[in-house]
Image (cartoon, grey):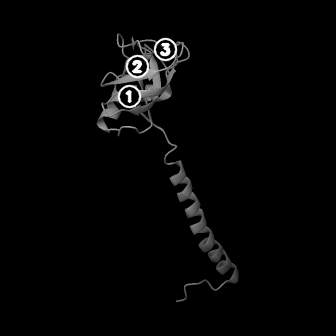
Amino acid sequence: MPLLPKSKKARRRLMVVAVAAPIVAAAAGLSLFAMGDAAVFFYSPSEAQTKHVPPDKLIRIGGLVQPGSVRKLADGRIEFAITDNRAVSQVSFRGDLPDLFREGQGVVTQGSFDRSGVFEAREVLAKHDEKYMPKEVADALKKSGEWNRGGTGS
């Protein structure tokens, strides 16, 4: 039984597929490889602890600003804690906080953990109105079973 089809048209199609498939696979592989370092993953505080995110890996961490945790230090840093009501992550940030940043509100921070386990934020994003919570934060709270629909909605 011959491997190639008898029809000239079918052999031509098979040849086009045989040439195009490796080219498309190589392009997809190169694209995924190039994007590997550009992807920033989102974690809730409990996910970050259970998955043991390595230090210096750029990630986003989000949850609610824990009441009573915001401290402004003399050197200009601001320290606060983010919680998903299951775990708490300590955050250190140097810069201007968004105007809507306050205790008990949803935030998403981007940065990395240092060697001591403190999250060094490079950017802090806060909610923009009374009924909004960042989608990642709302999803993480729902997943952990700590979602309070009456408090804030998405």
- Tell me which corner region of the image, top left, top right, bottom left or bottom right, holds residue 13: bottom right
Q: Is residue 58 above or below residue 146?
A: below
Q: Is residue 11 above or below residue 92?
A: below
Q: Is residue 32 above or below residue 45?
A: below
Label 2 and label 3: CA atoms lie apart by 10 Å
Q: Are marks 2 and 1 in contact (CB under 8 Å)?
A: no
Read off the residue under disc 3: 101
In primary-sequence order, the first of circles 2 and 1 is 2
- Tell me which corner region of the image, top left, top right, bottom left or bottom right, holds residue 70: top left
Q: Amino acid at mark 3?
A: Phe
In primary-sequence order, the first of circles 2 and 3 is 2
- Tell me which corner region of the image, top left, top right, bottom left or bottom right, holds residue 12: bottom right
Secondary structure at badge 3 equals: loop
- Nearest-to-viewer mark from 2 and 3: 3
Label 2 and label 1: CA atoms lie apart by 15 Å
Read off the residue under disc 1: 119
Q: Residue 108, image x and y in percent?
A: 47, 25
- Nearest-to-viewer mark from 1 and 3: 1
Secondary structure at badge 1 equals: strand
Secondary structure at badge 2 equals: strand
- Residue at the far top: name it: 68
Label 1 and label 3: CA atoms lie apart by 17 Å
Q: Residue 20, image x and y in percent?
A: 62, 68
- Residue at the far front: name it: 75
Identify which residue is drawn at 35% across, 34% down: 48
Read off the residue under disc 2: 64
Identify which residue is drawn at 70% across, 79% down: 9
- Nearest-to-viewer mark from 2 and 1: 1
Instruction: Using the rendered image of the protein, determine whether residue 74 is visible from the camera's viewpoint.
Output: yes
Q: Are marks 2 and 3 in contact (CB under 8 Å)?
A: no
Q: Amino acid at mark 2?
A: Leu
